[in-house]
Amino acid sequence: MPDVTVDARTTTDRRSVLLAGVAASAALAVPTGLLTAPPAAASARRGDPFTLGVASGEPAPDGVVLWTRLAVDPLADDGLGGMGERHTDVEWELASDERFRRVVRRGVETTGPELGHSVHVELAGLRPGHEYFYRFRADGAVSPVGRTRTAPPPTSMAPLTMCFASCSQFEHGFFTAYARLAEEEPDLVLHLGDYLYEYVADDYVTQPDNVRDHVGPETTTLAGYRQRHAQYKTDADLRAAHAVAPWLVVFDDHEVENNWADDVRELPLDPAGGDFADRRAAAFRAYWENMPLRAAQRPDGPDMQLYRSVGWGRTAAFHMLDTRQYRSDQPCDDAFPATCDARDDPAASLPGSEQERWLADRFAQSRARWDVLGQQVFFSQVDYVPGEARGFNPDAWDGYTASRDRVVDSWVQAGTRNVVVLTGDVHAHWAADVKRRFDDPGSPVVGTELVSTSITSGGDGSETTEDTAGQLADNPHIRLFDNRRGYVRTRFTADELTADFRVLPYVQRPGAPVETRASFVVEDRRPGLNPA
């Protein structure tokens, strides 16, 4: 359907206030320029169904996915958000202006309990490289307004501002970093996993003092995962980050269970009993219901097609990887830090052999200036034990060295112009030069890795730890470590990539400011980090 303007419906809108990043219990705020409509009288009688906000994702040159999920009681134990078994017609509108005077699309979607009362609107036929605004109506209420954009035309070299983040443990702090990310008003947001955590309240392995608690037991059922996703989205700062720009998402482990690997659980017994495949299916279903993903990503039981490529003109190609669903079991008994011969097993794979071949094909066919891997766990080698002894993380690519070598060789052999690996998981900012072989001092630098710290996981953090100096000395390819919370802001142009590592001084109380801890530049055709 072509992008045409139709008359907007008559509505009463008011300008939203700038998100101040104050207590997460404050009234919903969204970044400057977005509008939120007051609820109608019917909403007051039934409760506001848009308590979980709105989101968009999967931008293409001609389209995008619009998302919302209805919940008048987000923390309901049955995971249905107080909406019960009924079905609801949800109207949606897309406009080229924030006041909806130029509505270009509208329609109706019906949702119900089989979808967790979620709505996924897949649009096509829109203008490339264009900003849009969207909203929903249901039960007499009007949702907050979201802003989104389509990707530029396939031949465009338009600059791109992209922020990426990971690891938001609800109990460990306030989501102020999401608020500060929203204030950046990026073109695109990548979330690289651990969007939520599965634990029952006060049951995290490395536990700072909680500032708020999870509701419900450990998530093992569909109702539990739905409830946990809803609890996270009751946070106004997270809702604001979703509303400001389209997202690309991939899960890591905690969206299901810590350190899971394919069909292998972390622990031998599920705390609620039952089969791990059932738990995985429940987690995948709830994840899809709560993210702005396409129907192509809708899971089929315990299987979900999550790895995919998304282009941003000729500027960048984002290859979103799944490093959990197909991996071999972790070596070294999954101890940390550890080393063992099984780390170098050529038969082992982190992404699985099929995904390795898919990625090699993406490299071979790419015409993008920057090929970007959106993935979950540390790609570069990291010896965590200072001094002569060695110790690695077998849950990361260091547990699958032959698999990492094959991936690196695939981009080198394809002549891929610029490769940048984006990583989450480790709750600290890191930046590293990717070498073709890390144990060979003469091996060339063939790419760049940028690792985002956590949004909250681990609490306030610190600039350094007692091991920082020794770890940096033992890993000379690593150029930055910082243990504060935050996110990474990037700027892609035809000539260079700039990365700003943004940090907050605290997250265990609300309202923290943000600052840039370090900045690096990567030049076109010159892999490696240069201080900005």
Image (tube, rainbow, N blue to C red):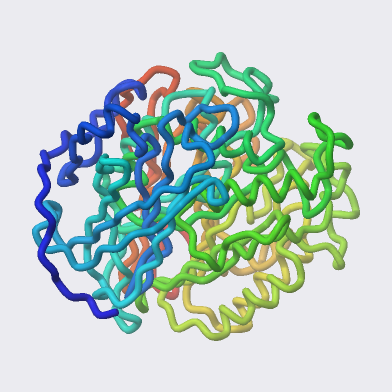
Q: What residue is at 41 percent from the left and 23 percent from the top?
A: 506
Tell me: 331 left or right of 39. Answer: right
Name the residue nearer the viewer: 524 or 151. Answer: 151
Q: What residue is at 68 percent from the left and 43 percent from the top?
A: 256
Tell me: 523 left or right of 148. Answer: right
How many numbered discs?
Answer: 0
Image quadrant assignment for residue 530: bottom left
Residue 86, percent across and down? 48, 43
Q: Is residue 495 above or below residue 336?
A: below
Residue 57, percent across and down? 40, 59
Q: Is residue 59 above or below residue 461?
A: below
Q: Is residue 101 above or below residue 486?
A: below
Residue 260, percent across and down? 76, 45
Does residue 480 appear in the picture of this structure? no
Name the image quarter holding the N terminus.
Answer: bottom left
Does residue 192 appear in the picture of this structure? yes
Tell me: 421 left or right of 276. Answer: left
Image quadrant assignment for residue 268: top right
Q: What residue is at 83 percent from the left and 39 percent from the top?
A: 274
Tell me: 459 left or right of 403. Answer: left
